[in-house]
């Protein structure tokens, strides 16, 4: 294979493009890749050891934590704490933010927000899951414990974001605001290798992804858009194809490669939608925009929302530009109607 490059080499190479970058971000991303390898190993033997299933407790959002949710959270948390670059984390699996206590970490510049295991309902049935992460520069002074404000920054302030997909192969995909790059894990040598440089999403796609079981609870504009996707019109390649895995990372990854739209609207049960702004929607939105697509809450750009709570939810629409534009038309014409 010509031009074979590892994640570590690629990050250092890119860092040289920006002389101001001090190498801290490289070290931070390498701790994420280390944790991803450990989680990869555990997920791959999930059927063999007593690791699948519920942990017997609920997270702050009232969802049953799976054993692998806890394991992934602990793995990423300790990998991040072990380096000098991260002063604290916020996680789907932690009630509050966690400010690392030792001086080494308190002198660090970055906070990491994460969904350690995305799509956990898929673990027990051997379907792809993921990890999502988002990195910000702290606002509070270096050398002190982190503050809430460090975590409640709009997505436009992200320094980097990415995800790991534990699929038929494991991949790490990230952006630092200079394109989206994907690396495939080769477990035989324990290395992520560059496989998808400068990923871009087609402007128009043929795939729509939504949990259609909730159809009757959707806003009218979304219902009408779904019917539009299903109508026959050869000039616009309709009907589209429906694909829904139930793990955002996997649904997003497919749409990124093939073009498509992912929708998680508000429903009558979840008036603000289900997905979490800080560690699901913002990092995915940053990747999507960097790949040339769009991410909104149905009206506004996701990354411009000013967060008020760590576990805040938001309606989420992400995908190919032309598809999001059509969706917005339906939402605009049927505002606030169910
Ligand atoms: P998590 O497993 O981190 O709680 O996230 C699950 C999310 C997301 O991955 C997925 O898109 C969505 O929940 C699926 O929700 P439904 O089962 O309501 O479709
Ligand atoms: Mn999730
Ligand atoms: Mn999760």
Image (cartoon, rainbow, N blue to C red):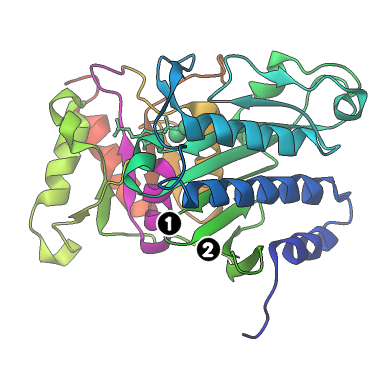
Q: Which mark is residue 237?
A: none
* x 13%, y 57%: residue: 239
Q: Quadrant of residue 88?
A: top right
* x 43%, y 54%: residue: 253
Q: Nearer the viewer, residue 141 or 77?
A: 77
The percent position of residue 302, horizontal first and vertical second, equals 49, 33
Q: Which residues are magenta?
A: 248-270
* x 9%, y 52%: residue: 231
Q: Is residue 35 above or below residue 258?
A: above
Which residue is under mark 2?
199
Quadrant containing ligand 1 reads: top left
Q: Residue furthest front?
A: 49
Which residue is under mark 1?
256
What crowding class fits label 1: few (fewer than 14 Cα within 10 Å), some (14-19), or many (20 or more)?
many
Q: Are marks 2 and 1 in contact (CB under 8 Å)?
A: yes
Rounded to the nearest angstrom, the CA distance separating label 2 from label 1 is: 8 Å
Q: Quadrant of residue 317?
A: top left
């Amino acid at each position: 294979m010509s031009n074979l490059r590892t994640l570590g080499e690629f990050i250092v190479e890119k860092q040289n493009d920006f002389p101001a970058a001090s190498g801290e971000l490289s070290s931070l991303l390498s701790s994420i890749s280390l944790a991803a390898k450990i989680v990869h190993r555990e997920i791959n033997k999930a059927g063999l050891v007593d690791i699948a299933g519920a942990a017997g407790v609920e997270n702050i959002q009232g969802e049953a934590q799976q054993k692998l949710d806890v394991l992934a959270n602990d793995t990423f948390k300790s990998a991040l704490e072990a380096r000098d670059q991260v002063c604290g984390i916020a996680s789907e699996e932690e009630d509050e933010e966690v400010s690392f206590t030792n001086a080494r970490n308190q002198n660090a510049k970055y906070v990491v927000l994460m969904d350690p295991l995305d799509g956990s309902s898929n673990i027990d049935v051997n379907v792809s899951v993921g990890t999502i992460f988002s990195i910000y520069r702290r606002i509070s002074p270096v050398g002190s414990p982190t503050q809430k404000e460090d975590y409640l920054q709009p997505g436009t302030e992200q320094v980097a974001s990415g995800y790991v997909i534990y699929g038929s192969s494991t991949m790490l995909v990230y952006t630092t605001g200079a394109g989206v790059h994907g690396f495939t894990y080769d477990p035989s040598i324990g290395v992520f290798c560059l496989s998808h440089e400068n990923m871009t999403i087609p402007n128009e796609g043929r795939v729509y992804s939504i949990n259609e079981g909730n159809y009757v609870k959707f806003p009218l504009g979304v219902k009408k858009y779904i019917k539009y996707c299903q109508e026959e019109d050869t000039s616009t390649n309709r009907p589209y194809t429906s694909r829904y895995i139930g793990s955002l990372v996997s649904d997003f990854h497919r749409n990124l490669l093939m073009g498509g739209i992912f929708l998680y609207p508000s429903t009558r049960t979840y008036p603000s939608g289900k997905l979490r702004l800080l560690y699901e929607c913002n990092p995915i939105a940053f990747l999507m925009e960097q790949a040339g697509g769009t991410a909104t809450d149905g009206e506004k750009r996701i990354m411009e929302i000013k967060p008020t709570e760590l576990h805040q939810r938001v309606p989420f629409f992400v995908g190919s530009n032309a598809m999001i534009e059509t969706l917005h038309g339906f939402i605009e014409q049927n505002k606030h109607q169910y």
